[in-house]
Image (cartoon, rainbow, N blue to C red):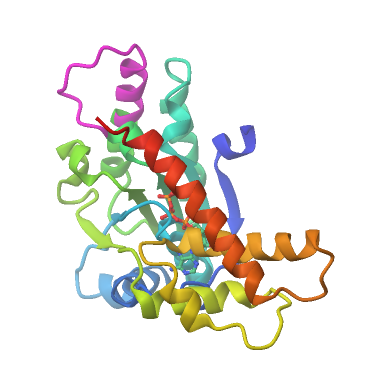
Amino acid sequence: STAKLMGKDAKSKVTFDDVAGLQEAKVEVMEVVDFLKNPENYTKLGAKIPKGVLFVGPPGTGKTLMAKAVAGEAQVPFFSLSGSEFVEMFVGVGASRVRDLFKKAKEKAPSIVFIDEIDAVGRSRNKVNMFQANDERESTLNQLLAELDGFGENTGVIVLAATNRPDVLDKALLRPGRFDRHIYLELPNKQERKEIFEVHLRPIKRADGIDVELLASLTPGFSGADIANICNEAALIAARKKKDLVEKEDFIEARDRVVGGLERKSQIISPKE
Ligand code: ATP
């Protein structure tokens, strides 16, 4: 959508309360919140506040959610764009979008720029690519690097980016002063899945005795996004059956559907040889 391409400038209402598990990542992210809220504590000692932080982790582990929570906790505006949006753009458009977004972020500083799927623009440049989109991607990447270098130290803009493919990123992006800090978000363990269920069960009108422990044991390998999906799917299933409350069997049915979806996805992604 155009609105998304232009970059959203919204106050995020997400807080750490909405992010379950991810304890280590949260601790590191809290420091970023403090950079935004109390920059003087660092600058008065001559420290340079980091400009770029890279969230690394599998799909659906809460990278976008965490970025929004940083903005929500620090109460600063959140500007976002997605790397994959640039792939189909006309030459020159990607670079100017990046320039405009950073301009707005600087005007509204302290603020956050969030770049989802940075690997889509930030893939290593020295690999020969047979696709035409390459030129556009490169000019977008160059503009991004120029922005990171161009805005001086301690401007109050912190750039957060997310990827599940850190291995393909252009080394230039990872140099000191760019995305030199990495925060890892892993798939949740059983206890963390339980906590994620608890967050996503909050808005659901459910029958007594929904066993969160059981749901957590039935979902090994599921991401936070999959769990959110199960909770919503369960409510949809119960609604279709004209129930007043969502019951255990609805959650089990929803889990089976989500498993089905995941199996189909993994067949597409990794066809059997
Ligand atoms: P992708 O790599 O696919 O973009 P992502 O890591 O950015 O995924 P999000 O978009 O943040 O993942 O997660 C999608 C949704 O899944 C969130 O909006 C939230 O509802 C849920 N979710 C993911 N992780 C968590 C978590 N740790 N706690 C609570 N909810 C979560």
Up/down of 73 relative to 3, above or below: below
- Location of residue 259 with respect to 149 vertically, above or below: below
Residue 146 shows up from this direction: no
| Quadrant occupied by the C terminus | top left
Please, which residue is most extreme toward the bottom here?
209
Would residue 136 be counted in the magenta stretch?
A: yes
Residue 100 horizontal/vertical position (percent): 49, 35
Q: Is residue 239 above or below residue 265?
A: below
Residue 62 occupies quadrant: bottom left
Q: In the rendered view of the protein, which quadrant contains the N terminus?
A: top right
Considering depth in this image, is 1 or 107 the residue closer to the camera? 1
Queried whether the magenta region covers residue 148, the answer comes back as no
Magenta residues span 123-141
Q: Is residue 168 left or right of residue 246?
A: left
The residue under the point 56% across, 68% down is 14
Near-viewer residue (109 or 235): 235
Residue 87: image x %, image y %?
42, 25
Quarter of the rendering containing residue 45: bottom left
Percent from the top left, x then y, of residue 73?
49, 73
Q: Nearer the viewer, residue 192 or 121?
A: 192
Give the image quarter of residue 5. Answer: top right
Q: How many marks?
A: 0
In the foreground, 102 or 152: 102
Q: Residue at image x 54%, y 79%?
A: 198
The residue lying at 53 percent from left, 73 percent from top is: 18
Residue 237 in view in this figure: yes
**Image point (41%, 45%), residue name:** 115
Please provide percent x and percent y for residue 32.
34, 68
